Image: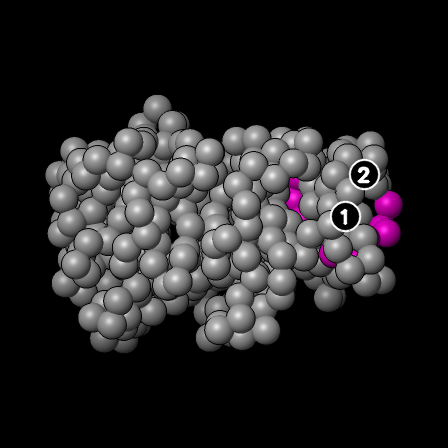
């Protein structure tokens, strides 16, 4: 549970705080979803948009009568509902739950890796993390390839999957973290209190309670000095020191000084920042390009960003979410209880406890259902 708390505590972006909805959350499969979610957190995965084999999202999970299937961009059911839980596609495969086990289907709905795993994550760089418990090691993690073959034997307590050819691992709760290559060889020794996946060639790690950055050779390239540090995105990383957020480049030079009480990552050239008690957006020159006016703001995706009004007082009093364009103009009025980023031209939204998909005009492609 320590790893779970740590993962949830680190890097609370506005998207994290919106509690991205997960399809298939019915009373019948709640326990399955809780187990699925715990395993995903233990493996350090984060929700990402599904992709087809050519990198473009084409399929979207939905739930009908307690079973999950997939629709296309037109809202047509192309993989019939048959699964307790269905995740997004990644690298041409999607993780699904059948009974109480996990396996993988392709974009034709064919089960290409049988559902035999108590826990599993989506594929990244051709490999997926799976849990293959034995009586004396109930939570050991290893890796499979796209043929379902075990390529790295289960031996780890924590991992975040492969990024830039390396995966962060630890062998036990509270133990130091290091990095393995795709042969399972430890190439960066376990020496960090916390360590995260690589992004743009660098990874945030901690020693002595401070964050710094290392490269894929394990060399410290940005000294340990930050209270929190996040992935590099769009060439910049969000860091915190003395209770303020700013952005650094890959040399550790501040491009945007420590001046914001809260901030989120850059995406498509803009980043949400909190100025006073409202959120707006800055560019990479630290110019405010969308004035602070929102209670909630998230990074841009496909030219649109989720914004919201109101606060999370309780689940009975949720803020309303909508979408703006890069001019800051509202293009979809705030009316959803939750809203996810656009991916493949559609966005996943929640209304009165039911999930649906909208297009960029705000029209439903899949009307809110289970």
Q: Is residue 183 left or right of residue 330?
A: left
Question: Residue 122 at what x, y percent from top left?
Answer: 34, 47
Question: Mark 1: which secondary structure?
Answer: strand
Distance CA(mark 2)–CA(mark 1): 8 Å
Q: Is residue 129 left or right of residue 97?
A: right
Question: Mark 2: which secondary structure?
Answer: strand
Would you place residue 259 above or below residue 110 in this image?
below
Question: Residue 322 at what x, y percent from top left?
Answer: 54, 47
Q: Residue at x 59, y 73 (%)?
A: 313
Q: Which residues are magenta?
A: 257-267
Of residues 14 and 40, which is closer to you in this image?
14
Q: Residue at x 30, y 64 (%)?
A: 25
What residue sits right under mark 2 in the picture? 288
**Residues marked 2 and 1 touching at CB (< 8 Å):** yes
Q: Is residue 271 one of those drawn in magenta?
A: no
Q: Residue at x 64, y 50 (%)?
A: 297
What residue sits right under mark 1 in the picture? 292
Of residues 10 and 302, which is closer to you in this image?
302
């Amino acid at each position: 549970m320590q790893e779970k708390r740590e993962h949830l505590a680190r890097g609370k972006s506005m998207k994290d705080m919106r509690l991205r909805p997960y399809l298939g959350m019915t009373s019948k499969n709640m326990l399955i979803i809780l187990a699925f979610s715990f395993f995903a957190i233990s493996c350090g995965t984060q929700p990402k948009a599904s992709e087809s084999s050519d990198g473009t999202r084409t399929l979207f999970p939905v739930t009908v009568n307690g079973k999950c299937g997939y629709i296309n961009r037109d809202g047509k059911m192309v993989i019939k509902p048959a699964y307790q839980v269905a995740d997004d596609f990644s690298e041409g495969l999607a993780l699904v739950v059948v009974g109480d086990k996990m396996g993988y289907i392709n974009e034709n709905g064919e089960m290409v890796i049988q559902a035999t795993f108590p826990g599993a994550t989506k594929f990244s760089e051709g490999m997926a993390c799976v849990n293959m418990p034995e009586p004396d090691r109930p939570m050991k993690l290893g890796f499979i390839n796209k043929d379902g073959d075990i390529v790295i034997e289960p031996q780890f307590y924590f991992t975040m999957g492969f990024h830039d050819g390396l995966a962060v691992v630890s062998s036990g709760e509270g133990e130091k973290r290091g990095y393995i290559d795709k042969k399972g060889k430890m190439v960066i020794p376990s020496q960090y209190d916390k360590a995260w996946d690589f992004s743009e060639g660098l990874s945030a790690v901690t020693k002595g309670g401070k964050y710094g950055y290392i490269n894929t050779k394990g060399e410290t390239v940005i000294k340990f000095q930050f209270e929190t540090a996040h992935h590099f995105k769009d060439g910049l990383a969000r860091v915190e020191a003395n209770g303020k957020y700013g952005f650094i480049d890959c040399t550790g030079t501040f491009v945007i000084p420590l001046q914001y009480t809260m901030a989120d990552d850059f995406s498509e050239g803009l980043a949400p920042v909190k100025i006073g008690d409202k959120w707006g957006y800055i560019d990479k020159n630290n110019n405010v390009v969308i004035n602070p006016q929102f209670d909630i703001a998230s990074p841009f995706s496909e030219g649109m960003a989720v914004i919201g009004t109101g606060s999370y007082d309780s689940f009975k009093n949720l803020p309303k979410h909508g979408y703006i364009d890069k001019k800051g103009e509202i293009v979809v009025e705030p009316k959803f209880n939750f809203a996810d980023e656009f991916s493949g031209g559609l966005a996943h939204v929640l209304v009165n406890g039911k999930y649906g998909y909208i297009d960029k005009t705000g029209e439903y492609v899949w009307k809110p259902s289970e």
